[in-house]
Amino acid sequence: MSLSLTVSIAKSLLMARFKQTMVAAVGVTFSITMFIGLLSFMSGLNDLLDGLILNRTPHIRLYNEVQPSKIQPIDRFKEFSHSHNFVNSVKPKSSKVEIYNYGAIYQALKKDTRVLGISPKIACQVFYNVGASDLSGNINGIDVEAENKLFSFSEYVVAGNLIDLKNTSNSIILGKGVAEKMLANIGDVIQVTTSKGELVQLKVVGFFQSGLKDLDNVQSYASIETTQKLLGVSKSYITDIQIKLNDMTLAPAIAKEYREIFEVQALDIQTANSQFETGSFVRTLISYTVGITLLIVAGFGIYNILNMMIYDKMDSIAILKATGFSGKDVNRIFITIALSIGFIGGFFGLVFGFTMSALIDQIPFNTEALPTIKTYPINYNPNFYIIGGIFSLITTYFAGYFPSRKASKIDPVIIIRGK
């Protein structure tokens, strides 16, 4: 049987029971719409939660950590080399948190094609002076442009301008929690005490809010030059090198490599956020499980609708077989009907799913913890639409194949006698 004849007969049968056809198509449309809308929304929320950590965390962090010497003087004596030596009150070795030979390391990292970007940082412990009280906190000295490029720092600046941190000497961007405790406003001059006891005055040029309250209550940012002045160190003084890679999954292996080459501590993002990684995976798994379950449940409904449609068309099947159509021809006709319903319903499901996602994306979402987020987050991942479109065709194909296959084997005489 030719394809044109198959399509013509399928079209006639579809239009003969138009209401049933519409019900089946609406079932497909509804399931795909809800699948797209639900998965886009849940994935958007997951991306939002992931971004709170991942956007502010380097893939690899190079730093020096003050640790006790692994080899103690007693271990150097040959007569005690085969003994168990117990040493109490071991003091850290005389080393600094500064990364030695920073310039050479920076140049080597720039030549590494696996590295997406580098942002140096200086960690500085201070006390914020508030009248007679002192608040403990941290000031991170950053390369403003590199920090913004790698970690989208400007998105977390809720007041003021990030570039003022670079253009204004002795300036600082306070964490929102710190600013509230100090009752500081933009343009004010605050006073901090460094770990060496030095009193320094800094001009407030902005506030930032990361969404992590504990962090916002203690942390502030200044330029690298300003932080070096605070500590009274040279311009080559750097305590951390933050690295982002082209492929985050390579971080553990590359961190181990850097640890051996540069003789510094190297912490990869997977190790630093192992618990977070597990939580993110579980949330993503739940999102896909809910979405696929919704499609499967809808698939059974579509199967029942098409099964009843084919049962109601038994007289048409009998006529087709009586006029010379084979069982395979009948099967092919009803599969064409099912795929037509799947295609039409799936198409409108994708359109309505996108529309539903766009509407959710416009709903206001205001929270003090996330001031930069104005509406509910939506993930417009093309994979969701591909999965939904393919599933609509697969579901309707099998929903039409099994009942039509059974009906195609029935003797037309039995059908006519039954009528």
Image: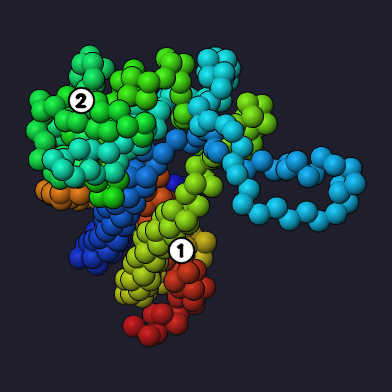
Q: Residue 294, can we see it? A: yes
Q: Residue 312 placed where, x, y %?
A: 31, 74
User: Residue at horizontal 73%, vertical 56%?
Assistant: 86
Tag shown at residue 398:
1
Residue that lies at the very extreme toward the bottom in this rendered image = 418
Disc 1 + disc 2, Cβ < 8 Å: no
**Residue 187 location (% of width, % of height):** 10, 25
Q: On the picture, is 209 further left or further right than 419?
A: left
Task: State the mark number for residue 7.
Answer: none
Mark 1 neighbour class, 10 Å CA radius: few under 14, some 14 to 19, many 20 or more: some
From the viewer's perspective, is residue 401 above or below residue 168? below
Q: Residue at the location (50% across, 52% down)?
A: 274
Indicate which disc, 1 or 2, sits on the residue closer to the N terminus: 2
* Residue 331 versus residue 170 in the image, above or below: below
Asked if residue 253 lies left or right of residue 152, the reply is right
Estimate the spatial distance between the alpha carbons at disc 1 and disc 2, rounded to whole Å.
73 Å
Task: Decide if residue 376 is on the left or right side of residue 313.
Answer: left
Of the residues shown, which amino acid type is indicated by label 1? Phe
Which residue is identified by label 2?
A: 201
Q: Amino acid at mark 2?
A: Gln
**Image spot of residue 135 (x, y percent):** 24, 44
In the depicted structure, whether residue 314 falls above or below residue 189: below
Q: The C terminus lies in which quarter of the figure?
A: bottom left
Q: Nearer the viewer, mark 1 or mark 2?
A: 2
Q: Is any atom of residue 14 visible in this view? A: no
- Report which quarter residue 258 is drawn in: top right
Camera-side residue of 311 and 108: 108
Q: Nearer the viewer, residue 161 or 155?
A: 161
